[in-house]
Amino acid sequence: MTANPGGTPTIVLVGHGMVGQRFLEALAERGLTATHRVVVLCEEPRPAYDRVQLTSYFSGRTPEDLSMTDMEFIDGHGIELHVGDPAETVDREARTVTARSGLVVGYDILVLATGSYPFVPPVPGKDATGCFVYRTIEDLLAIEEYARKATTGAVVGGGLLGLEAAGALKGLGLTSHIVEFAPRLMPVQVDEGGGAALLRTIEDMGLSVHTGVGTQEIVVGEDGAVTGMKLSDGSELVTDLVVFSAGVRPRDQLARDCGLAVGERGGISVDEQCRTVTDPHVFAIGECALAADGRVYGLVAPGYEQAETAAATIASDEAAFTGADLSTKLKLLGVDVASFGDAHGTAEDCLDVVYSDSRAGLYKKLVIGRDGTLLGGILVGDAEAYGTLRALTGSVPPVAPESLVLPAGAGAPAQLGPSALPDDAVICSCHNVTKGTIRGAVTDHQCTTVPEVKKCTKAGTGCGSCVKVLGQLVTAELEASGVEVDKGLCGCFAQTREELYEIVLALRITSYQELLDRHGREEARGGDGCEVCKPAVGSIIASLAPSIGASGYVLEGEQAALQDTNDHFLANLQKNGSYSVVPRIPGGEIAPEKLIVIGEIARDFGLYTKITGGQRIDMFGARVEQLPLIWARLVDAGFESGHAYGKSLRTVKSCVGQTWCRYGVQDSVRMAIDLELRYRGLRSPHKLKSAVSGCARECAEAQSKDFGVIATSNGWNLYVGGNGGATPRHADLLAQDLSDAELVRLIDRFLMFYIRTADKLERTSTWLERIPGGLDHVRDVVVHDSLGICDELESLMAAHVSHYRDEWAETINDPEKLARFVSFVNAPDTPDPVVGFVPERDQMKPDLPLLTIGMRRTEEDVLEGSAQR
Amino acid sequence: MTLAPETTDLKVRLRLADGWFTACDLGALLPGRGVAALLPDGRQAALFRDRAGSLYAIDNRDPFTGAAVLSRGLTGTHRGRPFVASPLLKQRFDLATGQCLDDEEVRVATYEVKAV
Ligand code: SRM
Ligand SMILES: Cc1cc2nc3c(=O)[nH]c(=O)nc-3n(C[C@H](O)[C@H](O)[C@H](O)COP(=O)(O)OP(=O)(O)OC[C@H]3O[C@@H](n4cnc5c(N)ncnc54)[C@H](O)[C@@H]3O)c2cc1C
Ligand code: SF4
Ligand code: FES
């Protein structure tokens, strides 16, 4: 039976929000738009848009950017969309809907997707000028307009949306307050500990948070506009603008008016097929529906699932909505907050694993069942692991749960990638896409990029929190199916650094051009290479020089053209074009005579001196033409290059050790000097640092070094893969209680294995984390010789050690090379006028304003070729 | 200012507003490596020679930092076009047009250059 006998059956959708739009897409996918007339009544002045991303309007997204409605889709499927025309009444007897414009549409099936409305607590003054809610684009436009004349704003409600609204107010330049009745922020998603971490971070951002207080009254001035609010603790908050964000309520009035059953606390009652329990011709989906499991879902993912279920039911397919996961990951004001599964630990007998670092604003909690099943969790401050953890929820993780939340470095961090997940793990919860579906997109649908997979599966097109895991899965799947993922070094070489190393070693290639022309990418052959591969290949050739018959001197012949500017001038370029000079001071030990020489040279050349973080002395502000003169004196006094400029061994720091220190158990200074002299000049993928401590007190900080040595009463412990810098990593113990000879032999092997297999600019720490098998593999190779290459590694190092020559001594004795150390090829005695200095604290510093004089960046100037001085 | 003695036959010359200016011997230019030349009006030019022997000249000042260092950058080929990467913050500049490849709003002056 149809509403318009003889005509096509009609589906009427009331509400064109996110879920409504998804329902239309689901109808189209099932071919129902072809067999049915589809009429949509849309209340807002614009078709469906992305409400989840609403706040991004304030970071520059236009309402058009937010739109989710492709008019080609609407027209193409013959959907009749009535924008700005809400449904006013439903006559279930006659099966008609009447819209505000007077339009009457008969239906066979009516789908209500009316969403929810923001709840405004019934406080006096709530309707005053300057009071807003936060739900639609129109709300945002109104807030933005009003904020122009306001200086302070307050948000009522410290939940998810309240925090978003407060961030938006702050972004509009207002002093922002958050007033939350509950004792903590985001009471629904996080527990007390998480709320505390969140509070600290949010207050650090300059927002004022008032928890545990209610709003009693909005104070209004004579002109009827907001001036403040009275709080339940008796205080008054001065504010020009109030945004209510105290929760939402289902919009079920239309349903109530036509006699459909609604829940006690609102929501249109539906069954598992999303059909109203009252009328088989009427469905309700999204935030207006009270699902069969007794809940009203306020998130978009469950709404989408309901849309699919309703469309499937209409198409007579089997589908059911029995409940959904409330996992969320948000970036609130730049802070990661995620909760998933049974976040509050309501299951019987469950246990918590909690990691909390208040100083860093970190809080991580996992809820684990008695049998080890991961039930849920909360992450605040770092939600990196969210994608993996959410997908593992409901199963027993393959590694200890603690290791999933501990920061890297504390204990052994588990590297549990998405490859460990089962195929039915949900990767994208916004669109309910499983790992299996994503893999299928690559294998069956030939998607080769993340954007293609997103388009094909919809994964990653909602909140975006799964995109990282998505990328990892796509790469893994491509690799598994033999599709080539370009891992080449750069646009010139399709090989990795490791592969190029093998080619150079095996074929004894000593020239970059030969390597490029014979082994480069087709389009790069015969060209000039690029700034990425030139130094990388230069470094490989230098590391292997004695073994392949190349010159070990980096300024020799073609090699000079491959070096970064620092290596080319054997000094470190500073911001104004001058250089710094760092002589080697092995182990940090220096005799007074040599200290005096450094002092004299610095004085005579007017250089700025500083003790470095690497236990030596840096002299700054040398002009390029002064470098040979400075080095002539340094070499004369017995100094050598410190290679502060090279991707090579920097320093081996020492503590004073057994000789002087009452705790020392070995001679750490002697060992540091020995190691520094052994490995000096060794070119490597990235810089190499080391240290030797005389006892376990570790005054030399050896565990933060690429290879660090700590004395024991029986010998030496060797640690590898440590790093300071931006991502510090404590080194791992490779071997214990070594004799001097054993120690040196292991370091020889370790360094040569690293040089052979690391990527360009990859420190030992990242290398150790990346290579398959990690530390265990490296130990197998260098301690147990599992690959049978240790002899080769040792002989490569022996060749390096025996061929080492100081490159500065070599340079100052070579007139042709010295000729390069000039500011101007046509005026070798003229210094660069841009390099100037001004006094500071008894020394000098670069004259920075000099750098900006004459620097004009307008297009016009440049086109005229006018002087840029 | 003392000018370097000219020793080989071929000279690198730059076209300035008032005619051709001799910067240096061709032999002073190592393929793939630049040198800086001081111009009569105090400006600086960075001169380069690629492996095919073509010559290029651009302003030596790095527009991002103000330091006169472009001659000390590494050169290369990007989509068939020659470029130099600033040694300071690594932005690349097309040697033929002066256009910055990493920021379309930035361009450095170029000079016509020949070896005679
Ligand atoms: C001079 C010095 C600072 C000082 O005044 O003390 C310094 C200066 C520079 N450091 Fe450093 N670092 C200096 C000690 C350190 C230390 C401390 C140490 O070695 O014990 C560290 C942390 C330890 C570590 O490396 O693990 C350090 C971590 C870095 C990093 C981060 C490395 C990382 O793996 O994250 C960089 C950036 C890079 O190399 O990519 C860096 C890069 C630089 C550069 C090369 C940046 C640049 O391109 O201009 C600086 C130029 C050096 C110069 O002009 O002479 N510097 N730098 C120190 C020279 C030590 C020496 O005697 O050779
Ligand atoms: C700022 C903000 C941030 C959010 N962030 C997230 C998030 O990160 N993750 C998440 O999962 N969810 C988030 N949500 C919630 C999410 O937006 C909703 O769950 C989702 O929009 C619900 O879709 P819906 O279609 O049911 O309702 P809506 O998108 O609200 O659409 C309902 C539509 O029906 C219209 N309508 C109502 N009555 C009638 C009528 N009588 N006739 C015609 N039309 C009518 C309304 O005007 C509205 O356009 C956020 C919400 C907001 C406001
Ligand atoms: S590490 Fe030990 S031996 Fe070295 S200085 Fe510190 S306490 Fe003394
Ligand atoms: S989980 Fe939100 S887009 Fe995938």
Image: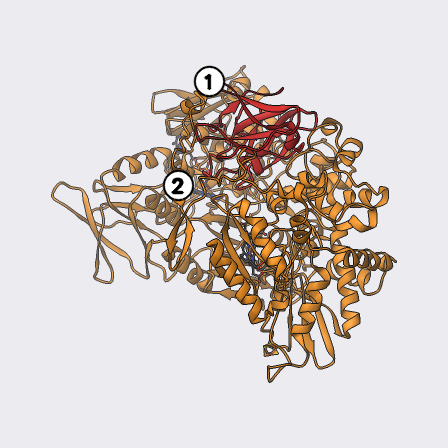
Q: Is B21 on the left or on the right of A858, as rendered?
A: right
Chain for colour orange: A
Q: Is A17 on the left or on the right of A533, as rendered?
A: left
Task: Specify the quadrant that holds the N terminus of chain A.
Answer: top right
- Tell me the CA gap for discs 2 and 1: 28 Å
The 10 Å Cα crowd at callout 2, few under 14, some 14 to 19, many 20 or more, is: some
In the image, is residue A48 above or below residue A593?
A: above
Q: Quadrant of ligand 4?
A: top right
Residue named by callout 1: B18
Colour theme:
by chain
> SS of the residue at dot 2?
helix
Give residue A369's quadrant in the image. Answer: bottom right
Colour representing chain B: red
> SS of the residue at dot 1?
loop
On the image, the x and y values in percent for residue A3 come to 49, 21
Q: What is the residue that sits farthest to the top in this orientation?
A: A6
Q: Are marks 2 and 1 on the same chain?
A: no
The 10 Å Cα crowd at callout 1, few under 14, some 14 to 19, many 20 or more, is: few
